[in-house]
Amino acid sequence: MSYKAPLKDINWALKHVVGLDRVNSFPHFAEATDDLVDAVLEEAAKFAEGVLAPINHSGDQQGCSWKDHEVSTPDGWVEAYQQFQEAGWMQLSASAEYGGQGLPYLIGSCVNELWKSANMAFSLCPLLSHGAIEAVTAHGSDALKAKYLSKMIDGAWTGTMNLTEPQAGTDLAALKSKAIPEGEHYRVSGQKIFITYGEHGMAENIMHLVLARLPDAPAGVRGISLFLVPKFMVNDDGSLGNRNDVRCVSIEEKLGIHGSPTCVMSFGDEGGAIGYLVGEENQGLACMFTMMNAARHAVGMEGYSLSERAYQHALAFANDRVQGKAMLSGSEGRSTIVDHPDVRRMLMDMKSRTEAMRMLAYEAAASYDIAEASEDDTQRAFHKQRGELLTPLVKGWCTETAQKITYLGMQIHGGMGFIEETGAAQYYRDARITTIYEGTTGIQANDLIGRKMARDGGEGIQLLVTEIDATAQLLSDSDDERLQLMGAQLATANEQVGEVAQWVINNDQPQQASGAAVPLMMATGTLVGGWLQGRSALAAVAEISSGSSDSAFLEAKIGLAQYYAGTALPEVASYGAAAIQGGELVDVLSVDQLSA
């Protein structure tokens, strides 16, 4: 089944719900006009549909191979990346100072959705490169930026993120990789695992961002520094020199994302890989968080991008598969399964939640853009706080929700969904990793309740609750009875989240708060999705009232918001109860009892 970029839905979320005008009203982003954005999205759609989507299934079936430290990507990957680079897609949201186009991150998010839906495994390469660019731009010395950034932003050189080690996992305090000072550089040694695109033949050089310890570093995470370690050394004139002492020693066999090589990387087997300090000594974790936050938002986008692809696949199958008697169309005799109530329920669930996730990711991206572009200190602080609050929801809630949506996509296919030939299972397999890498769901949830809720005494979440209340009131005050009901449902869910969030913030038992974190995150994500669906419904009613001729599309937006409010928002109550009860009962069994 071919992929069709959902440009109409993207433009609706971008311009009518989240508000592109909130971002391009700032001089910093004034060039991102509606016409320019439309042109960018149309070209991105052509590339996604015509280049990336056709090699998605074949890349999954073929996978990657490793031999003598070299990695071969699936057929068509090298050629696709060459076209990707030549078209300038890596430059879209990067700094204009180093050759980027300087467009808002919000627009980059819209475009990245298309890459991820069309071919998630391929999209992981530019994802990691973007993160590396962010880290070097924010923390690199002027000399590092001058030497490396333009080629990275051009796409000629890709980037990686080297955190995890075999003995450490998520516990970065246990990292053992070393960096020994040697003149103006360092000699880096150690082994890193789970390195996405750590080795490949798609670009002429790879910039590895590596966490390691200096000889006199303090213990724990306070003693970690960040280093840029190129695959090939770069001469002063920009040409490539000798191969650095870094090798891929194996690649992983995985459940999904087969077209993306997940590498075990060894640094310093022959005396030490030459690396350059990024940021200050022993401040590597803070520097890496710049990269990780961008990556976490991008991985959350993978959740709804794969959901969109699974929905399109399932809808096409449901419209084609003849089985049983129609119940919704009113026609006699056998019908396609799209007219079966349970199939329609699943399709509505898939589409309404996918659109809620898309709007959430765009809302977070818009906040980051405003925080960058505004000259008002209060506005900058508010949107920085808002973007940081929403990011663990984008990463945690969107990826967890994608598990359900890609599962429903397979379920609609019935037995055919279990057969690889149909392609439905690939989205289910690919989505599974999204809840794990760049910080598991539990890590996102604990980040939400700790750094994003409790650290500011609940100010950020309270501001969000107040804003959601205002939207609920607008819905309740509408003349449209459908919106009035949505307003009541949203207000109820909002009150429930506010109460549970306050319980977690005030709880002086860390194990209870942590035990409640994931259900609270799921409740908050579901609520925010309902808030944005409510804003979508209000915008659709306003467009209809203004005389828009696209009434069918607008009525569909209202219907999706209705469905979400009636089926998703009630889940907030159960998540809230599970948060409090689960938090209190998380240690009711001892380790020995768990094994009994």
Image (spheres, grey):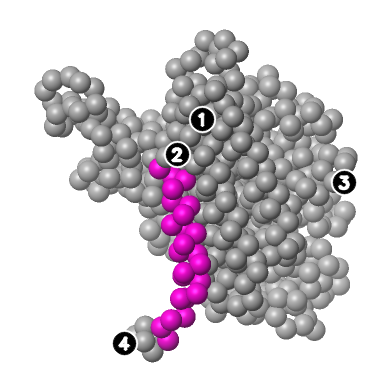
Q: Residues within 10 Å of mark 3 (few under 14, many from 20)?
A: few
Q: Tell me the CA gap for discs 4 and 2.
A: 42 Å
Residue 154 seen anywhere in this rendered image of the structure: no
Mark 3 secondary-structure assignment? helix
Horizontally, is 465 left or right of 10 in the view?
right
The stretch of residues the image draws in magenta is 567-590
Q: Is residue 542 above or below residue 525?
A: above
The residue identified by callout 1 is 483
The residue identified by callout 2 is 564
Q: Residues within 10 Å of mark 1 (few under 14, many from 20)?
A: many
Residues 556 and 424: in front is 556
The residue identified by callout 3 is 377
Is there a contact, CB below 8 Å, between mark 3 and mark 4?
A: no
Residues 438 and 408: in front is 408
Say which label, 3 or 4, has the lower sequence index.
3
Which is in the foreground here, disc 2 or disc 3?
2
